[in-house]
Structures are given as structure tokens and as C-alpha cells.
């Protein structure tokens, strides 16, 4: 009886060993296969590594500050190419100064400052004398109804000027503004310079013209009458032809020494 049990146990043991060897052999024959759990673990690791690389790239992007060099250079170059010239604009009379200010505001609102220079109401300094004899300097308009503007002509600047209230049109050829001659610009701007600058000679406002009949009201020839021969606005003097001892004699007087007859 014992010998039969021993025989059965031996057969069972042999079967277990055979199954074990069979599983090992199967494992050796398929070395590339992994269990489902092992595959999940590998995919998880791959995801983790990719995330680390993306974080590193994001960090690099944040650390590196790249300036738009090409854009800045393009802007600088375009500004250097802007060429401005002086033009004359026809405007409403007696509104020259307010229209000049309105155009300046329009240019600023439209962001066109780089295309515009000075906007000027042409004037000259005139010396006047009050009733008490005090001298004062006043600005007199050279060309009523006109202003000067230094600008570059393009579609934007053209419409900015034309859409400003009170401005009629550019002077010059029809449909195409004609720039001013540089010599004329220099002369006009010099006339409008302040007296203290020393760039221009202030004229004196003299209310007399050549041929006017006047009477001397002060000085050695008081009460003598004559005709105006010369008007010197630069020096504020007037030459009057006075009849002295039957002969017409030129007498130079200060403009305030005479009055109209």
C-alpha cells in the first residue's frame, strides 16, 4: 500500500517539475513580450519623461528674452527716409492762428508727428508807439489768409490737412502742391524772428505813404506843411518836401513829428 502512495507522489512531483520547465521554456522563447502591467508602467514612464522635457523647454523660453531687432531697424530706416518740405496753405482770413493750432492737434491725434515739422503763421515784428510815446513790438501778418507748414506729402498727411476745418487748399499747381523755395522760407522765417535774436531789423509802423499831405507838429519846422517823399520803416523816419523860402526842401523827420492834414 505504501509503495503505491509513493509511486503516486513521485508521478505528481514529476508533473509539477515538467510544468515548471515548460513555463520557463515558453518565457525563453518569447523574450519580447511583457505583461499588461509592465506595459502600463513603461507608458507611464514615457509620459513622465516627455513632460519633464516640455517643462525644461518652457523654462528656457521664459528665461530667454528675444527682442524684435529686425522690426526696430525697419522703423528707424523708414524715419530716416522721410523728407519734409515747406508748403503754403490757404486758410480763412483772421483765423490763421486758430487754424494752425487745430492742424497741430489733428496731427497729434492721427499720430503723424514724424511727418510734420513746424506750422507757422508768417509775421514780421513792427515797432509801434503809444500815445505816450512808449515803443512796443507787435506781430503783423505778412500774408493774411495763408499759413506755412513743413511736412512730407503722403495719403495720410494730405487728408489730415484737407480735413482740418478752415483750410482751403495747398497753393501751387492744380492737384499737386508746390513746395516753397528755400530762399523764400529763410527770408520769411527771419522776418518772424524775435527782436532779441538779432536776426532781423524791426520795422516801425508808419501810418503815412508817399504823396500824403502832412503837417509838422513838433520841432524846428512846426506848423509847416509838405508832401511825404520817402518812408523809412526800418528807422521810423519820414522825408517831407517842405517849401522853405520859396524852394521845395527835403526835411527828414521822425514819423511821430508829423500828422495828416
Image (cartoon, rainbow, N blue to C red):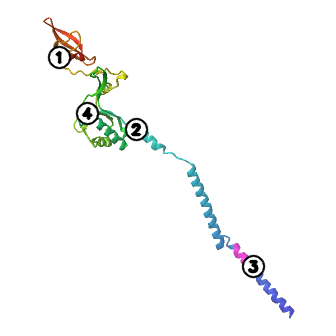
Residue 19 in percent (x, y) is at 74, 81
Q: Earlier in the sequence, mark 2 or mark 1?
A: 2
Q: Is residue 183 visible?
A: no
On the image, numbered disc 4 is attached to which residue? 146
Q: Which residue is mark 1?
A: 214
Label 2, residues with CA under 10 Å away: few <14, some 14-19, many ≥20: few
Q: Residue furthest right?
A: 2
Q: Is residue 173 above or below residue 223?
A: below
Determine the residue positioned at 62% across, 62% down.
48
Q: Are marks 4 and 2 in contact (CB under 8 Å)?
A: no
Going from N to C along the chain, the mark reached first, 4 or 1, is 4
Whole-angstrom CA distance, mark 4 to mark 3, is: 112 Å
Circle 2 residue: 79
Q: CA distance from mark 2 to mark 3?
A: 87 Å
First along the sequence among labels 3 and 1: 3
- Point out the stretch of residues depicted in magenta: 21-28
Q: Are marks 4 and 3 in contact (CB under 8 Å)?
A: no
Which one is in front in this view, the residue at disc 3 or the one at disc 1?
Answer: 1
Residue 4, given in percent of the width and then of the height, sits at 84, 92
SS category of the residue bearing label 2: helix
Amino acid at each position: 500500500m505504501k509503495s503505491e502512495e509513493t509511486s503516486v507522489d513521485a508521478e505528481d512531483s514529476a508533473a509539477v517539475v515538467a510544468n515548471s520547465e515548460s513555463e520557463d521554456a515558453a518565457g525563453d522563447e518569447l523574450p519580447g513580450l511583457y505583461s499588461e502591467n509592465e506595459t502600463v508602467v513603461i507608458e507611464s514612464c514615457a509620459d513622465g519623461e516627455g513632460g519633464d522635457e516640455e517643462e525644461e523647454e518652457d523654462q528656457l523660453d521664459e528665461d530667454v528674452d528675444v527682442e524684435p531687432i529686425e522690426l526696430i531697424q525697419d522703423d528707424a530706416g523708414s524715419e530716416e527716409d522721410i523728407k519734409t518740405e515747406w508748403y503754403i496753405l490757404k486758410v480763412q482770413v483772421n483765423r490763421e492762428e486758430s487754424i494752425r493750432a487745430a492742424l497741430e492737434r489733428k496731427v497729434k491725434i492721427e499720430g503723424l508727428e514724424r511727418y510734420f515739422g513746424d506750422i507757422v503763421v508768417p509775421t514780421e515784428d513792427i515797432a509801434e508807439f503809444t500815445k505816450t510815446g512808449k515803443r512796443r513790438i507787435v506781430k503783423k501778418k505778412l500774408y493774411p489768409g495763408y499759413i506755412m507748414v513743413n511736412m512730407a506729402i503722403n495719403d495720410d498727411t494730405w487728408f489730415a490737412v484737407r480735413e482740418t476745418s478752415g483750410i482751403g487748399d495747398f497753393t501751387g499747381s492744380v492737384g499737386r502742391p508746390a513746395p516753397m523755395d528755400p530762399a523764400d522760407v529763410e527770408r520769411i522765417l527771419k522776418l518772424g524772428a524775435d527782436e532779441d535774436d538779432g536776426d532781423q531789423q524791426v520795422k516801425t509802423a508808419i501810418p503815412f505813404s508817399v504823396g500824403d499831405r502832412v503837417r509838422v507838429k513838433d520841432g524846428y519846422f512846426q506848423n509847416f506843411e509838405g508832401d511825404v517823399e520817402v518812408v523809412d520803416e526800418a528807422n521810423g523816419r519820414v522825408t517831407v518836401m517842405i517849401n522853405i523860402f520859396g524852394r521845395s526842401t527835403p526835411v527828414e523827420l521822425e514819423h511821430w513829428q508829423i500828422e495828416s492834414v
